Image (tube, helix red, strand yellow):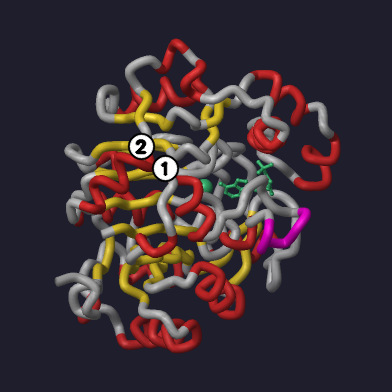
């Protein structure tokens, strides 16, 4: 079975936590990371916290093979640092066509006042490397000696595992409305960030996709520039306890209440089969650490059910705290697991 996890808003919905949980709960044969190192995914588990920019968030599942998509872009120093921090040497592989971001790409973006000023880019060199890739000038993973022994044909490996009935989880990055095609252009990232794009980044055809899980946070956040409907003043964000700092850049995130219209559009753009909602404990502190749907107060269940009805999609996973295990998993009850 193949599942794709995508962000439903502007990134930072908590995809890392959801994918980490799915790793623990489902122990997939393979977890594959898409996107690039501008996307920070946070995993908290057993009192430890990892801020991952390239290692798949399901790495905490010890027997899961970890892959980096051919459509992904990596910086070697970030990769090697994270592989060491996560102890994943020997079970993490890149595709031969994974793109490599070099120092010149970072320098190019840092000198670009449009990206730094107007767009509020993370300036990690991703867009510049992407542009080089389109121009056929980017160097790919197989050209780097340092990566010897870490290269596989990711598409082949995944399609073989699927043919044998195995489980694969595809970890998308950023959020639907940061998509180069479907987002709030020009305030977007340098790739399409919908489920179809991640299937393509990995090298799997649309008919091989079984589940698309779109991840929302209980409120909407955005870093960098661009429209944010219902944006709250900073004092109000602090008062509500919604103040967050960006994983990669350390910038303070803008925030707004949950946006049902955006969520509905994200469900359509991704053909989502399930939704996840994270940080429910920030809206309702009394649910912190809860793992059972039936034990949630009525008003909290109602809040979720109203969203389910509005987006016409079951909310199968609900985050109630930082740790990867702080999840209400309704997949069995709702018929998604046998
Ligand atoms: P860039 O893709 O790094 O050039 O950034 C373009 C825009 O997308 C900026 O507003 C960034 O803050 C935003 N962005 C890029 N990656 C992420 C992410 O992983 N999470 C949230 N925002 C992101
Ligand atoms: Mg993030």
Q: Nearer the viewer, residue 192 or 265?
A: 192
Q: Position of residue 57 (x, y in %)?
A: 35, 43
Give the magenta part as a residue range. Answer: 181-186
Q: Please state the horizontal and vertical placement of residue 297, each as a whole percent of the image.
A: 30, 82
Q: Main SS type for the magenta part?
A: loop
Disc marking residue 281: none
Name the residue: 33% across, 18% down.
Answer: 149
The residue lying toward the viewer, choosing from 132 and 101, is 132
On screen, 84 above or below 14?
above
Q: Identify the residue at the far left of this view.
A: 338
Quadrant of the rendered image containing residue 221: bottom right
- 1 and 2 marks in contact (CB < 8 Å): yes
- Disc 1 designates what residue? 33
Q: Is mark 1 within 8 Å of ligand 1?
A: no
Q: Is residue 239 visible?
A: no
Quadrant housing residue 99: top right
- Disc 2 is placed on an element classified as strand
Question: Circle 2 sits on which residue?
Answer: 67
Q: Check disc 1: other Cα within 10 Å, few if <14, some if 14-19, many if 20+.
A: many
Residue 321 vertical placement versus 336 (above, below): above
- In the picture, the quarter occupied by the C terminus is bottom left
């Amino acid at each position: 079975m193949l599942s794709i996890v995508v962000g439903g808003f502007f990134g930072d919905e908590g995809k890392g936590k959801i994918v980490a949980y799915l790793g623990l709960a489902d122990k997939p044969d393979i977890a594959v990371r898409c996107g690039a190192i501008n996307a920070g995914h946070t995993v908290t588990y057993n009192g430890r916290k990892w801020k991952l920019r390239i290692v798949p968030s399901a790495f905490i599942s010890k027997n899961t093979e970890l892959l980096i998509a051919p459509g992904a872009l990596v910086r070697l120093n970030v990769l090697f640092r994270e592989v060491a921090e996560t102890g994943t040497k020997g079970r993490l592989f890149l595709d031969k066509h994974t793109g490599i971001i070099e120092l010149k790409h970072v320098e190019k973006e840092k000198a670009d006042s449009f990206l730094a000023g107007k767009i509020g880019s993370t300036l990690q060199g991703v867009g510049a490397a992407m542009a080089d890739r389109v121009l056929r000038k980017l160097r790919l993973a197989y050209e780097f000696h340092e990566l010897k022994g870490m290269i596989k044909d990711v598409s082949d490996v995944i399609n073989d595992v699927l043919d044998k009935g195995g489980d694969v989880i595809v970890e998308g990055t950023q959020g639907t409305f940061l998509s180069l095609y479907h987002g709030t252009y020009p305030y977007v990232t340098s790739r399409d960030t919908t489920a179809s794009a991640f299937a393509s980044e990995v090298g799997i055809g649309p008919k091989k996709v079984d589940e698309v899980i779109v991840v929302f946070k209980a409120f909407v956040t955005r870093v960098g520039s661009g429209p944010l409907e219902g944006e709250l003043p900073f004092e109000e964000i602090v008062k509500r306890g919604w103040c967050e700092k960006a994983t990669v850049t350390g910038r303070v995130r803008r925030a707004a209440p949950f946006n049902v219209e955006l969520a509905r559009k994200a469900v359509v753009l991704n053909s989502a089969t399930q939704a996840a909602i994270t940080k429910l404990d920030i809206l309702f502190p009394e649910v912190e650490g809860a793992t059972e749907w039936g034990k949630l107060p009525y008003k909290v269940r109602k809040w979720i059910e109203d969203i389910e009805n509005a987006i016409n999609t079951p909310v199968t996973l609900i985050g109630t705290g930082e740790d990867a295990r702080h999840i209400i998993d309704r997949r069995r009850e709702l018929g998604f697991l046998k």
